[in-house]
């Protein structure tokens, strides 16, 4: 918190941001302004809501602090940048960026909000260092809707690969060096993103669909067509990295591609040793890259899934109950910092590990549990608990009375032939 203290104009929001961070790291079953304010000992959620909505501080500046914190403590000369999106299922139409769209969180098309994240993955650990909200065309084509959600009226539509490019360039422009980038088919299938990475001298291993066409010395072929032509001797068994149950072994093959522009281009193919399922990756490097390097880069893509799982499960990344963009950016940035704290402590503990071999290494989950138990467990008295119960009931009574008044007014207008006004529910 000392690292980001200077981003707050006043001491009150700075202290409250610290309490919110602890609340994000708590074991609360649900994390929002109400539950965290009660857990932190505040009399109402108004202070936490003010911190997210109106207090004077720059979430993008804190985002930059998160990036510097992660790179400093998880620094690795062979680190890889992983880009991916995650969705949060939402109700209604007013939450910024929400629409019916596919989200991997639900595995289907749902009313949801989607954001793209950039993860720094090295040998010491991994954590998110940047975020961009995906704002669909249904929003950018409606300036009034953007303004109501806290977006600039001139907000332009940007695809997910374009958001990924913005974050990668922001990382490089901050003075950091990286050799490799990886991502799934959304990013591998975008020629503009691949060209931008090549212009910056970056290597990449980006997943592509089986129908992707690539150019070889013998002509253009679909990726799956080339896979079918490979002899048995072309496949090598290599690990994509350690997993929860040991190393993740696959069969791998690589095919050289032709392209008149500088650099080396290859098609990497992965085969599941049990099911035979195939996956395909477009690869680029400024110089010849050994197969093990390409495999290591491709295997690093799973770090982003682990980051999402830990960020959501331990730091409330997806539990924001906010509608406007400024509040969203503030919540997810602090959640990123909370998760980064766990990742850094884990990395430091692993580096100095001197415990018995019969103990598993500390995980982020276990570090969170110890941190809460030893350092920050709040001890609120009975009066505080009852006071919060009274506050909730008082709020519920006001909301219920407001609903009844609107219902009665609408009923009276209907009886007298007047058109009913458009009403909306009272939201917290």
Image (spheres, rainbow, N blue to C red):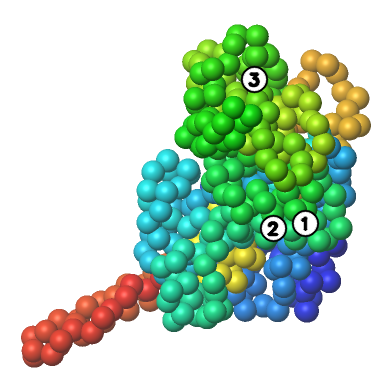
The residue lying toward the viewer, choosing from 359 and 399, is 359
Compared to 248, does 171 lie above or below?
below
Of badges 2 and 3, nearer the viewer stands 3
Q: Cβ–Cβ below 8 Å for labels 2 and 1?
A: yes
Residue 36 visible at all: no
Residue 171 disc label? 1
Residue density around tag 3, few if under 14, some if 14–19, many if 20 or more, within 10 Å:
many
Where in the figure is residue 107, as x and y percent of width and height? 42, 41
Judge whether residue 186 can be spotted in this image.
yes
Residue that appears at 60% across and 58% down? 162
The earlier-in-sequence mark between 1 and 3 is: 1
Mark 1 to mark 3: distance in Å? 31 Å
Compared to 90, does 272 lie above or below?
above
Q: Which quadrant is home to the N terminus?
A: bottom right
Secondary structure found at label 1: helix
User: In the visual, does 26 lie left or right of 277?
Assistant: right
Mark 1 surroundings within 10 Å by alpha-carbon count, few (fewer than 14), some (14 through 19), many (20 or more): many
- Secondary structure at badge 2 equals helix
How many dots with numbers? 3
Report which residue position mark 3 lands on: 252
Residue positioned 62% across, 65% down in the render: 329
**Residue pointed to by mark 2:** 167
Query: On the image, which quarter does residue 290 sit in?
Result: top right
The image position of residue 268, as x and y in percent, is 64, 28
Per the model, the C-alpha gap separating discs 2 and 1 is: 6 Å
Identify the image quadrant of residue 408.
Answer: bottom left
Q: Of helix, strand and loop, which one carries label 3?
A: strand
Residue 244 placement (x, y as % from top left): 65, 24
């Amino acid at each position: 918190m000392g690292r980001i203290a200077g981003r707050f104009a006043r001491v009150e929001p700075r202290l409250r941001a610290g309490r919110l961070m602890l609340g994000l790291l708590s074991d609360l079953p649900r994390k929002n302004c109400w539950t965290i304010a009660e857990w932190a000992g505040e009399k109402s959620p108004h202070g936490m809501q003010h911190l997210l909505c109106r207090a004077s501080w720059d979430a993008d500046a804190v985002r930059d602090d998160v990036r510097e914190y992660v790179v400093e403590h998880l620094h690795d000369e062979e680190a890889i940048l992983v880009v991916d999106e995650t969705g949060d299922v939402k109700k209604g139409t007013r939450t910024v960026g929400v629409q019916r769209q596919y989200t991997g969180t639900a595995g289907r098309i749902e009313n949801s909000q989607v954001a793209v994240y950039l993860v720094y993955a090295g040998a010491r650990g991994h954590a998110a260092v940047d975020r961009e909200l995906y704002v669909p065309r249904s929003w950018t084509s409606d300036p009034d809707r953007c303004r109501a959600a806290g977006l600039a009226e001139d907000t332009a539509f940007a695809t997910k690969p374009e958001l990924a490019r913005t974050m990668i360039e922001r990382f490089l422009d901050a003075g950091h060096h990286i050799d490799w980038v990886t991502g799934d088919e959304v990013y591998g299938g975008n020629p503009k993103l691949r060209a931008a990475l090549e212009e910056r001298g970056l290597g990449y291993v980006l997943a592509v669909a089986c129908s992707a066409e690539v150019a070889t010395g013998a002509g253009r072929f679909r990726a799956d067509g080339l896979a079918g032509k490979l002899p048995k001797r072309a496949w090598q068994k290599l690990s994509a990295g350690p997993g929860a149950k040991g190393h993740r072994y696959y069969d791998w093959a690589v095919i050289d591609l032709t392209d008149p522009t500088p650099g080396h281009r290859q098609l990497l193919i992965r085969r599941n040793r049990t099911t035979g399922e195939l996956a395909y990756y477009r690869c680029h490097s400024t110089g010849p890259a050994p197969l093990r390097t390409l495999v290591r880069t491709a295997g690093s893509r799973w770090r982003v899934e682990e980051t999402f799982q830990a960020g959501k499960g331990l730091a409330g990344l997806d539990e924001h109950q906010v509608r406007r963009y400024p509040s969203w950016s503030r919540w997810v940035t602090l959640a990123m910092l909370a998760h980064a704290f766990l990742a850094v402590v884990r990395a430091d503990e692993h580096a100095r590990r001197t415990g018995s071999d019969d103990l598993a290494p500390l995980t982020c989950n276990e570090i969170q549990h110890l941190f809460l138990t030893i350092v920050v467990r709040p001890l609120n008295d009975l009066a505080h608990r009852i006071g919060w119960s009274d506050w909730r009931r008082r709020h519920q009574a006001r909301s219920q009375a407001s609903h009844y008044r609107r219902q009665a007014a609408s009923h009276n207008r209907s009886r007298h032939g007047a058109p009913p006004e458009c009403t909306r529910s009272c939201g917290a």
